[in-house]
Structure formats: structure tokens, C-alpha cells
Image (tube, rainbow, N blue to C red):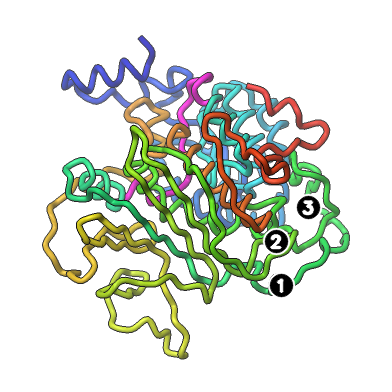
Amino acid sequence: MNRRSFLKSMLAAGAAPLLPGCFSHKGYVANGKVRLAFVGVGQQGWYDIQQFGRFPQFFECVALCDTDMGAPHTLNALRKYPDVPRFQDFRRMFDRLDGKIDACLIAVPDHTHFPIAMDAMRRGIAVYVEKPLAHTYEECELLMRAADKYGVVTQMGNQGHSTVKYHQFKAYVETGLVHDVDKVVAHMNFSRRWHKWGGKLTAFPKAEKIPATLDWDTWLGAAAFHDYSKDYVGGEWRAWYDFGNGCMGDWGAHLIDCVHEFLLKGDLPDTVEVLGQTGFNRFVYPMSSTLRFRFAANRLHDDFVLDWYEGADNLPPLPAGFVYATPDGIPKNSANDGQGKVRLYPGKEMYQRDGTIWQSLSHKHPLHVVGDYHRKLPDYPAEFCTHYEGFLRAVRGEMETLSPFRVAAPLSQLFTLACVAQRTGRGFAFDKATGTIPGDAEANALLRQPPRKGWEAFYKV
């Protein structure tokens, strides 16, 4: 019996929770604390470090790693953990601290999630990987297979998947309150980093001098070589096809996660359509995109349509009774931002065949019924623990994560299909059995992009 089966059988039998520190993916956790390394310590990485820092009883920081170690955005982490080893190359960190790391946070640009996670899992290290899970369809597939092979604890960093939103959605689907949904419209209409170029780029940025603090070769990872430019770093990487997964990879993980897990049962679409697009170019994501994913009826679900709207002026048609809301969820009567411009907070609407429409905002707010915002709805389980605490407790052997790679990888593959449609400017049929796009060589090649020379070994499970 493997460890996961053992835990399930214990819980099913009503056994008491495992004692802290008894188990981890590698065995006993020294001193009852997870030895945690942080890979990527600025920006999102620093936010994650602070969130993990709320649970000092569960972990100790054993290493910091960042390709731009010493740059301004890394200084907060360096001050917080001044006495732990520091690295710029994750490979060197794993080699030097072999057997001394139980788990790691991976909060780096999308294009380097994969090699770091793969290297860690091969060494028996649990991984918390920021969303989206990986940059390409193939990388998601390989990570899912590796997680199964190496048996480590995994978690993708879509933090809303551990909030009340998750527990309500799960309970309402399982009890039949949410049922027969045949269409979901999700939208994220804030301005993005690439909008400053107006969709008019005609070339990659010119080469600039590499900062003294930056290991540019390791920053590039397995991606095709590019000369250094400040337009690639500091969060700008999300704009570029070669490094990021755009708006869908960023916000889809928050807005579509429960839909994909509980309504679509992890399925992938049969077709992807580009209903509209502005600012198409070959370098960064479009100014706006409207995509449609069609899921043909099968043993998992009935016919299903998922529409995605992104772009500052690309608003979806909204049902009568739709409630505009502020980020804290307080309803208001107008979507006007006070300057005459419509501001639609990220969210989704779910259409049932009986005419009921559900609405939710962002990645933390619960569902309500359109047209009856104040309807009393059944109770649902409270938030058990945060995404971060859940990961640490899973490594300690006390529970399972809510966004493991078996859930997160197919969701992220959906994002990669969206990126292919945006990058080519056209839709396609997708063969789920083979994981290919038949009849479109360009689109199909984007599902499996060859790694840069020297990085091929990471692409083997």
C-alpha cells in the first residue's frame, strides 16, 4: 500500500490525524519542520514568501535562489533570511544542498517553471509552482507524469483554490444545486503590460547591457536565446509569447479552476475558436481576444461551451440583473469607474439549462444567483487552511493539496491551447487522444517547443 492509499484508509476509518512531523514525501521531517527553499524571491516570490512566513511552526527556510540575486526586488527576502545559503542557479542549489531540502517554492517566469520543478521532483523534493504550471502543453504533460512517477507532494499556486470559493463550488455541484451548466463566460478586462505597445511591435527589443546582478543564461532557461533587454524582466516577461502565457495563464487559473475541475472533470476542448482579436502580432499577446472552447458531450459532461474575454475594452454581453462589484465584493449599481469608462472586475457567469445564472468575482468571492443577489443559499464548508499552509501540511503527511498536478496540469494545458490560438490568430480542432492539432503544422509545433541546447535532459521522465 502506498502512502496516499494509507492516508486515505486511515481517514476513512476515522483515525486521528497523523502526528506532526511523522511523515513527508521523503520520510521523517527533521525537527517536525519542512526544509523549504525559495526559488524566485522578488515580486510574486516575495508575496509567496510572506504568505509561507505566516506558518513558522511548519517550516524553516534553508535556501534562497534568484537569477537576479541582489537586485532591488530581492532585498526584502535577503533581509528576512540573512543567514541562509544564496544561489543564482537552481541546479547548483539542488546539487549543493542535496538531501537537505524537503520542498521548494517556484515563483519565477512561466518559461522556467518546468525545468526547476522537474529537477526538484527527480530529487524527491515537493514543489509549489506558481501558476500557470508550465509554458507549453508538453511541459504540463511531462510534469503530471513526473509527479506520478516520483510520488512527491505538488501544488500549483492558484491560491483561490483553497478559499471558500472552492469549498462552496464543490459543495454546490456535489449536492446538485449547481447543475446542467452548458455555458460559462469568463472575463478579465484590466489593462495588461503588453497594451503599452498597442499591438504594433515589429521586432524584438534591441540588446542591452546585462546587469551585474543577473545570471541571464539561467534566466533564459530552456527558452530560445534572446539578447538581454529590460523589456523582458521585472514582470514584463508575461507579455511575450516566448516567456509568458499571457492573461489566460495569469487569470484563467483563478477564474476557470473550479469550472474545469468540477463541471468539466479535467477535460480538454475539442475545438478552440478565435471569435475576435485586436492588435495581433508575432511577439506579444494581442490587445484583446475573445476565445471559445467547445467541449463535446462525453462520459464526463454534456455539451459545454466556455467563452473567454480579455482586453480593456472587450466586455462580454452581461445578463439582466448582473451585479457589478468592487474588489471587496460589495455590490454597486453602476460599472462606471467615475471617469466615464466601464470597469468590469474579473469574474465569470455560469448558465444553467433551466435559466438560472450564477455569477462570481475574482478568485476568492463565492457564487450568487444573477437577479437575486441577496437570496439565502445553503451553507458550505468553511476554508480549512490557506493554499500555503495546505502545501506545508501535505509535505508533513497531514493532508493532500487541493491543486496537485493531476488537477493543475490539465487546467494549464487549457491555457496553453488558448496561447496557441492567440499566437497564430486562428482556431483549430484538438485531438485529445493524441494531444495534437491535426492539419495545422504551425499550431501543432507550438504545443511542443524544443528546448535550448543543454536543457534537453529535463524533458525526459
Name the mark on residue 213.
3
Whether tag 1 and tag 2 are in contact, CB under 8 A, the answer is yes
Residue placed under numbered mark 1 in the picture: 197
Q: Secondary structure at mark 3?
A: loop
Residue located at (49% from left, 22% from top): 148
Q: Which residues are magenta?
A: 146-163
Asked whether, in this view, residue 448 is left or right of residue 58, the answer is right
- Residue 10 at x, y percent in the picture: 24, 18
**Residue 19 in the image: above or below residue 388:** above
**Residue 191 visible:** yes
**Residue 64 visible:** no
- Residue 96 at x, y percent in the picture: 69, 27
3 vs 2, front mark = 2
Name the residue type under label 2.
Val
Q: Secondary structure at mark 2?
A: loop
Q: Nearer the viewer, residue 356 or 146?
A: 356
**Toward which corner of the image does residue 322 lie, by quadrant?**
bottom left
Counting residues from the start of the chain, the first of labels 1 and 3 encountered is 1
Residue located at (52% from left, 58% from top): 291
Q: What is the distance, in whole Å, between disc 1 and disc 3 at their CAs?
A: 28 Å
Label 3: few (<14), some or many (≥20) within 10 Å?
Answer: some
Label 2: few (<14), some or many (≥20) within 10 Å?
Answer: many
Label 1: few (<14), some or many (≥20) within 10 Å?
Answer: few
Q: Secondary structure at mark 1?
A: helix
Residue placed under numbered mark 2 in the picture: 284
